[in-house]
Image: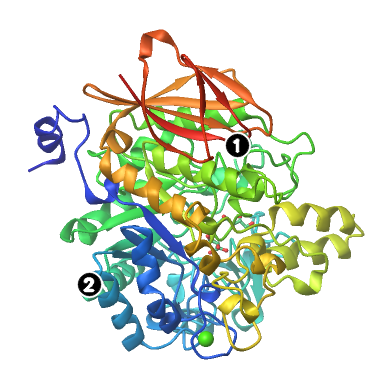
Amino acid sequence: MSEKQNAQNNSEHSIVAKNWWKEGVVYQIYPRSFKDSNGDGIGDLQGIISKLDYIQSLGVDIVWLNPIFASPNDDNGYDVSDYCAIMPEFGTMNDFDLLLSGLHERNIKLVIDGVFNHSSDEHIWFKESRSSRTNKYRNYYHWWPAEKGKPHHRFSFFDENNDAWKYDELTDAYYLHYFSAKQPDLNWENPQLRQEIYKIMRFWLDKGVDGFRLDVISFISKDVSFPPIPEIYNNDFPRYYANGPHLHQYLQEMNKEVFSNYNCMTVGECVAVDINDALQFVDSESKALNMFFHFDSVDYGYKKNEFKQPDPNGWKLTGFKEIFSKWNDVFADNGWGSIYLGNHDQPRMVSRWGNDSPEYREASSKMLLTFLLTMRSTPYIYMGDEIGMRNIRFNAIEDYRDIDTLKNYHQIKNTNGDVDYFMEGQKATARDNARTPFQWNEKEHAGFTDGEPWIKLNPDWEFVNAALQETMEDSVLNYFRKILKLRKQFPELIYGKYELLEKENEEVYAYTRILNDEKILVVLNFSKTNAPFSIPENIGLPGEVLINNLKEIIFHKSVIELLPYQAAVIRLL
Ligand code: TEU
Ligand code: CA
């Protein structure tokens, strides 16, 4: 049955076709930091296996694993040297098979991270490619012969000089790397390369994995004449990178050649894709991807034209609502969204969007989880957010491990920039904030490892850890389990129409989710002050409070007297 017919058959419930990946909740695991099984201080596959019951106890349906492939780890696995082998630090293929079957036994699907915009420079393809201009792998990458002069500037995220072209003496040519020089970009314009990638995808899907998160997939197509960047891009490199000439052709080809032959899901990391282009990626007719991650929310509240500095004026709830509402509306009739407030590239959710002071950490973590699990999009929960983990805010550059922070630090230092200002900003925005080890219990190293952890633990682990929260009925962890159950119990929370209330309210984010005659109201106080919210008469009367993140909830008729960071999900009559 086509997706369209399926949608029509389902029309009494919703206007979109139903799918497991629309109904599922995704739990993201950064393997390096989840659980170490052999005392080398690095999380690994056996570590994850030892925590399968914990993962199942959360109630999540899908696990997304960050890269686990062989890699020299210039960028923690986002530089792959062999796509069909497991990184020895993480374990063996046998461990992987055990993890996959362990998840499947528990009815949890596994999505892996496909890093196909670039490989490692230590991948055999690249070693061959750079060996001579006539090597048969030469065109697997982007080379610019030096006799043509210096190629037009391309920006690199992970290069100290921001230069994405690296000169290679061996063949007197430059190669392209949007990320670090150890992450050369693959040449998708080469049909042979594309077939190799499809083969790798099939290898994993034939093993039984349930889909792919596709790293920076919006960047894969390049204009290989490498012209100057057209002025309309105003030096917005990511935006230019996301508008490659054959991007949609490749995504559709990938779908036809690979994904359409499996019951799998795909979620693209679509850096610099905005609402106007959204449907091209996920429209049921376009036959490309199922979902993608946009960057509007995670870029919000950072200073423009300055690399990841928080805006001193902060961010506004009205702006936040506007972003999520507009992204909801794009997919109201077609396509499907994904929603996240943090991941391995972002600071901790509660530190950024909530309030991580001892007083409000729990309430605001629960409030944000309520938001993620009551929106009309597939929720992606980053490990540790279910126990309210916080930013570590390293003071010393020596504590950082991330290439992103280290590269910027050196760049600023070498150009006599303001290093202190940069370091202060990193406390709020650095990726390592989310990469500190998962806090399992109150034992040494929070039960993450028996050895020395590869990155420091957040010193708050004695009071922020999973074991402690297991024992407390009202912990963030137990609240997460409850709100997740609620999403399963009320289909309106998945498929129901989303309607924003009180758009201008700077304290309260309120919306309804409506499916047929069922109406649910969600109210979220994003502020640390009391905030009354009046339920408008025309939408219904407060019926049952399905969940509330604080001890009590105060109503005066149709007015809810929300306490700081209070969240409630209410059935309307
Ligand atoms: O991230 C792509 C990306 O552009 C950003 O999210 C990135 O973290 C940021 O620009 C750095 O300043 C993906 C992965 O999620 C990230 O971990 C990798 O480092 C990157 O691709 C390269 O593979
Ligand atoms: Ca280990």
Q: Where is residue 57 in the image (x, y as percent from the top left)?
A: 36, 63
**Which mark is first along the chain, 1 or 2?**
2
Q: According to the image, label 2 marks what residue?
A: 105
Q: Position of residue 504 (x, y in %)?
A: 59, 17
Q: In the structure shown, which secondary structural element does the residue marked by tag 1 occupy?
A: loop
Q: Which residue lies furthest to the right in this view?
A: 416
Residue type of the residue flagged with mark 1: Tyr
Horizontal side, residue 545 vs residue 256: left or right? right
Q: In the structure shown, which secondary structural element does the residue marked by tag 2 occupy?
A: helix
Looking at the picture, tell me which residue is in the foreground, 238 or 306.
306
Q: Quadrant of residue 296?
A: top right
Q: Is residue 216 visible?
A: no
Q: Residue furthest top?
A: 538
Q: Nearer the viewer, mark 2 or mark 1?
A: 1
Residue 156 sits above or below residue 437 on the image:
above
Q: Where is residue 252 in the image (x, y as percent from the top left)?
A: 28, 50
Q: Can residue 566 be seen in this view?
A: yes
Residue 223 sits above or below residue 45 on the image:
above
Could you tell me which residue is drawn at 82 percent across and 64 percent down?
Answer: 395
Indicate if the residue with disc 1 has its beta carbon within 8 Å of ligand 1: no
Q: How many labels does the image show?
A: 2
Q: According to the image, label 1 marks what residue?
A: 565
Could you tell me which residue is drawn at 24 percent across and 39 percent down?
Answer: 284
Q: Where is residue 186 in the image (x, y as percent from the top left)?
A: 46, 67
Residue type of the residue flagged with mark 2: Glu
Could you tell me which residue is drawn at 33 percent across and 43 percent down?
Answer: 486
Q: How far apart are marks 2 and 1 (CA)?
A: 38 Å
Q: In which quarter of the image is residue 193?
A: bottom left
